[in-house]
Image (cartoon, rainbow, N blue to C red):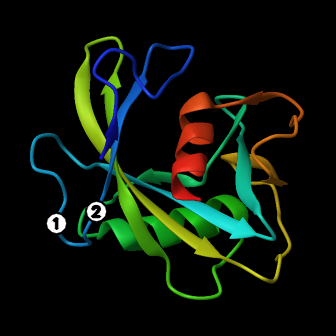
Amino acid sequence: MISSRDQPLAVDDRGNALVSFARGVEGMPPGDAPLPAAGVALWRDGRVLMVFDRHRQCWELPGGRIERGELPRQAAERELLEESGQEPDAPLRLVGHARFVLAPDRRAEYLAVFAGHCSQVRDFRPNDKTTAIAWWDLLEALPGHVQPLDACLAALAR
Protein backbone atom coordinates (compact mmCIF):
# COMPACT_ATOMS: atom_id res chain seq x y z
CA MET A 1 0.00 0.00 0.00
CA ILE A 2 1.14 3.50 -0.82
CA SER A 3 0.05 6.11 1.69
CA SER A 4 1.21 9.01 3.76
CA ARG A 5 0.06 9.63 7.30
CA ASP A 6 0.95 13.32 7.26
CA GLN A 7 0.31 14.34 3.66
CA PRO A 8 -2.15 13.04 1.07
CA LEU A 9 -0.73 11.68 -2.19
CA ALA A 10 -2.62 14.39 -4.12
CA VAL A 11 -5.27 17.05 -3.48
CA ASP A 12 -7.49 18.85 -5.98
CA ASP A 13 -8.72 22.45 -5.92
CA ARG A 14 -11.98 21.42 -4.19
CA GLY A 15 -10.17 19.79 -1.26
CA ASN A 16 -10.69 16.17 -2.33
CA ALA A 17 -7.67 14.09 -1.32
CA LEU A 18 -6.16 10.85 -2.59
CA VAL A 19 -4.89 9.39 0.68
CA SER A 20 -3.77 5.86 -0.26
CA PHE A 21 -3.44 3.37 -3.07
CA ALA A 22 -3.40 -0.38 -2.47
CA ARG A 23 -2.81 -3.12 -4.99
CA GLY A 24 -6.03 -5.04 -5.20
CA VAL A 25 -7.55 -8.38 -5.97
CA GLU A 26 -10.57 -8.35 -8.24
CA GLY A 27 -13.74 -9.30 -6.40
CA MET A 28 -12.23 -8.33 -3.03
CA PRO A 29 -12.83 -4.59 -2.61
CA PRO A 30 -11.80 -2.82 0.58
CA GLY A 31 -14.54 -3.01 3.18
CA ASP A 32 -14.00 0.13 5.21
CA ALA A 33 -15.65 2.56 2.74
CA PRO A 34 -17.92 2.38 -0.33
CA LEU A 35 -16.56 1.57 -3.82
CA PRO A 36 -18.87 3.61 -6.08
CA ALA A 37 -16.61 4.29 -9.08
CA ALA A 38 -14.02 2.88 -11.46
CA GLY A 39 -11.33 4.53 -13.58
CA VAL A 40 -8.98 3.51 -16.37
CA ALA A 41 -5.36 4.23 -17.21
CA LEU A 42 -5.16 3.18 -20.88
CA TRP A 43 -1.58 3.26 -22.23
CA ARG A 44 -0.20 3.60 -25.74
CA ASP A 45 3.49 4.08 -26.54
CA GLY A 46 4.29 5.25 -23.00
CA ARG A 47 1.41 7.74 -22.92
CA VAL A 48 -1.82 7.52 -20.95
CA LEU A 49 -5.22 8.45 -22.33
CA MET A 50 -6.73 11.59 -20.81
CA VAL A 51 -10.20 12.96 -21.50
CA PHE A 52 -11.23 16.62 -21.21
CA ASP A 53 -14.33 16.80 -19.04
CA ARG A 54 -16.84 19.29 -20.46
CA HIS A 55 -18.33 20.19 -17.05
CA ARG A 56 -15.24 20.21 -14.81
CA GLN A 57 -13.10 21.80 -17.56
CA CYS A 58 -10.06 19.63 -16.86
CA TRP A 59 -8.11 16.63 -18.13
CA GLU A 60 -8.74 13.41 -16.25
CA LEU A 61 -8.64 9.65 -16.64
CA PRO A 62 -11.76 8.06 -18.13
CA GLY A 63 -14.03 6.69 -15.45
CA GLY A 64 -17.17 7.15 -13.44
CA ARG A 65 -19.89 5.66 -11.32
CA ILE A 66 -20.56 1.95 -11.10
CA GLU A 67 -24.18 1.44 -12.10
CA ARG A 68 -26.61 -0.85 -10.27
CA GLY A 69 -25.86 -4.49 -11.16
CA GLU A 70 -22.49 -3.63 -12.70
CA LEU A 71 -19.10 -4.94 -11.59
CA PRO A 72 -16.24 -2.43 -11.30
CA ARG A 73 -14.55 -3.90 -14.42
CA GLN A 74 -17.76 -3.51 -16.44
CA ALA A 75 -18.08 0.10 -15.31
CA ALA A 76 -14.46 0.81 -16.28
CA GLU A 77 -14.94 -0.70 -19.74
CA ARG A 78 -18.23 1.16 -20.29
CA GLU A 79 -16.88 4.51 -19.11
CA LEU A 80 -13.74 4.16 -21.25
CA LEU A 81 -15.79 3.54 -24.37
CA GLU A 82 -18.44 6.19 -23.59
CA GLU A 83 -15.97 8.93 -22.74
CA SER A 84 -13.22 8.28 -25.29
CA GLY A 85 -14.36 5.79 -27.94
CA GLN A 86 -11.21 3.78 -27.16
CA GLU A 87 -10.92 0.07 -26.36
CA PRO A 88 -8.03 -1.91 -24.89
CA ASP A 89 -6.23 -4.62 -26.87
CA ALA A 90 -6.84 -7.13 -24.06
CA PRO A 91 -9.09 -7.18 -20.99
CA LEU A 92 -8.37 -4.42 -18.48
CA ARG A 93 -6.54 -5.53 -15.34
CA LEU A 94 -7.24 -4.28 -11.84
CA VAL A 95 -4.26 -2.27 -10.65
CA GLY A 96 -5.62 -1.37 -7.23
CA HIS A 97 -8.01 0.62 -5.09
CA ALA A 98 -7.53 4.34 -4.52
CA ARG A 99 -8.88 5.67 -1.23
CA PHE A 100 -10.18 9.24 -1.24
CA VAL A 101 -11.37 11.61 1.44
CA LEU A 102 -13.91 13.86 -0.25
CA ALA A 103 -14.69 17.45 0.59
CA PRO A 104 -16.55 19.12 2.11
CA ASP A 105 -17.92 16.42 4.45
CA ARG A 106 -14.66 14.38 4.65
CA ARG A 107 -16.35 11.12 3.65
CA ALA A 108 -14.17 8.24 2.50
CA GLU A 109 -14.71 6.24 -0.66
CA TYR A 110 -12.73 4.10 -3.09
CA LEU A 111 -12.11 4.07 -6.81
CA ALA A 112 -11.24 0.78 -8.54
CA VAL A 113 -8.33 1.58 -10.88
CA PHE A 114 -7.89 -0.53 -14.01
CA ALA A 115 -5.13 -0.40 -16.61
CA GLY A 116 -4.66 -1.61 -20.15
CA HIS A 117 -2.89 -0.96 -23.42
CA CYS A 118 -4.12 -0.13 -26.88
CA SER A 119 -2.27 -0.22 -30.16
CA GLN A 120 -4.98 1.25 -32.36
CA VAL A 121 -6.44 4.71 -31.73
CA ARG A 122 -10.09 4.86 -32.68
CA ASP A 123 -11.94 7.92 -33.88
CA PHE A 124 -13.14 10.23 -31.13
CA ARG A 125 -16.37 12.19 -31.24
CA PRO A 126 -17.12 14.83 -28.61
CA ASN A 127 -20.09 13.90 -26.45
CA ASP A 128 -22.12 15.25 -23.55
CA LYS A 129 -19.26 14.60 -21.12
CA THR A 130 -15.98 14.69 -23.07
CA THR A 131 -14.84 17.37 -25.51
CA ALA A 132 -11.37 16.01 -26.37
CA ILE A 133 -8.89 13.22 -25.74
CA ALA A 134 -5.09 13.31 -25.50
CA TRP A 135 -2.29 10.81 -25.02
CA TRP A 136 -0.16 12.23 -22.19
CA ASP A 137 3.38 11.29 -21.14
CA LEU A 138 2.83 12.59 -17.56
CA LEU A 139 5.41 15.34 -18.10
CA GLU A 140 4.43 17.58 -20.99
CA ALA A 141 1.91 20.35 -20.51
CA LEU A 142 -1.59 19.75 -21.77
CA PRO A 143 -3.71 22.74 -22.82
CA GLY A 144 -5.76 23.56 -19.73
CA HIS A 145 -5.88 22.12 -16.24
CA VAL A 146 -4.89 18.51 -15.44
CA GLN A 147 -6.78 17.00 -12.50
CA PRO A 148 -4.00 16.34 -9.93
CA LEU A 149 -5.76 13.28 -8.45
CA ASP A 150 -5.89 11.65 -11.89
CA ALA A 151 -2.29 12.59 -12.71
CA CYS A 152 -1.20 10.83 -9.51
CA LEU A 153 -3.36 7.78 -10.32
CA ALA A 154 -1.89 7.57 -13.82
CA ALA A 155 1.62 7.49 -12.35
CA LEU A 156 0.59 4.82 -9.84
CA ALA A 157 -1.01 2.72 -12.59
CA ARG A 158 2.02 2.88 -14.88
User: In the image, which disc is placed on residue 6?
Assistant: none
The answer to whether residue 54 is left or right of residue 7 is right
Q: Nearer the viewer, residue 91 or 75?
A: 91
Q: Residue at x 81, y 40 (%)?
A: 139
Q: Nearer the viewer, residue 129 or 106?
A: 106
Q: Residue at x 65, y 58 (%)?
A: 83
Q: Nearer the viewer, mark 1 or mark 2?
A: 2
On the image, numbered disc 1 is attached to which residue? 28
What's under tag 2, amino acid-wise? Gly
Image marks 1 and 2: residues in contact by CB distance under 8 Å:
yes
**What x and y, as percent, mark residue 77?**
50, 72
Q: Residues within 10 Å of mark 2 (few under 14, many from 20)?
A: some
**What x and y, as percent, mark residue 93?**
44, 75
On the image, numbered disc 2 is attached to which residue? 24
Report helix, strand or loop for mark 2: loop
Q: Residue at x 58, y 74 (%)?
A: 116
